[in-house]
Amino acid sequence: MGGPLVMTRHRTFLACLLLPLSLAGCAGMADSITAARGGVRPATEAGAPGADEWAQRWSVQVGPQDQEPEQDRVRKTAATMVDGIRLYDNGDFEEAIARLSEPGIRSAPGPIRVEALKYIAFSHCVTNDLADCRLAFDTALAIDPDFALGRGEGGHPMWGPVFEQAKAASEQLRARAALAHARERMRTQDLWRPW
């Protein structure tokens, strides 16, 4: 009925329809990478802090003691932080994890460690290591229980659910700790004492 000529026409017609669609898909590759990150552009493009700003943030928290050696250490650690974020932005997730786990960053003040742990968690989730992703989020929430992902970061299909689980567990731990503290306080009160 149709024969080989009709089949060829159908294939040609389909190719003519699909070629522009596939080319449009290639043109939007950068957008798809951004979408894969939950709509989050790479930190370096989105105006992430540079080494000077990280150094300034840390210096404010460290204080004026031992200024000279401390400032040098702060500058090196800030450069490590920026390099780790750049590696993450470039898709070198294993190297980003290594760089953001260096001792200088691990000894930085809480907010800087939390930021590094966020990128470590993202890197683990992107490489499908969900256990270490969760561990990084748990550690960040232990440092700062109020830690939350940014508006464009929270709904990411890879790390969004992992973060939500970590946040729920953190809130549950906080509630248990508050209850235990209240029980201990009640236990030490003398309920028979007259007012």
Image: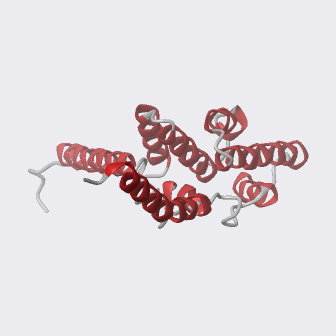
Vertically, is 9 above or below 120?
Answer: below
Horizontal and vertical percent position of residue 186: 18, 48
| Residue drawn at 24 percent across, 48 percent down | 185
Query: Which corner quadrant of the image does residue 69 belong to?
Result: top right
Does residue 109 appear to the left or right of 139 in the view shown? Answer: right
* Front-lying residue, 162 or 145: 162
Q: How did the renderer colour the structure?
A: secondary structure
Q: How many marks?
A: 0
Q: Can residue 144 be seen in this view?
A: yes
Horizontal and vertical percent position of residue 113: 60, 46
Horizontal and vertical percent position of residue 172: 26, 47
Horizontal and vertical percent position of residue 182: 23, 50
Q: The C terminus lies in which quarter of the figure?
A: bottom left
| Residue drawn at 41 percent across, 39 percent down | 134
Q: Is residue 148 visible?
A: no
| Residue drawn at 46 percent across, 38 percent down | 133
* Front-lying residue, 122 or 106: 122
Residue extending furthest left? 192
| Residue drawn at 66 percent across, 66 percent down | 46
Does residue 179 appear to the left or right of 75 in the view shown? Answer: left
Does residue 18 appear to the left or right of 46 in the view shown? Answer: left
* Front-lying residue, 45 or 163: 45
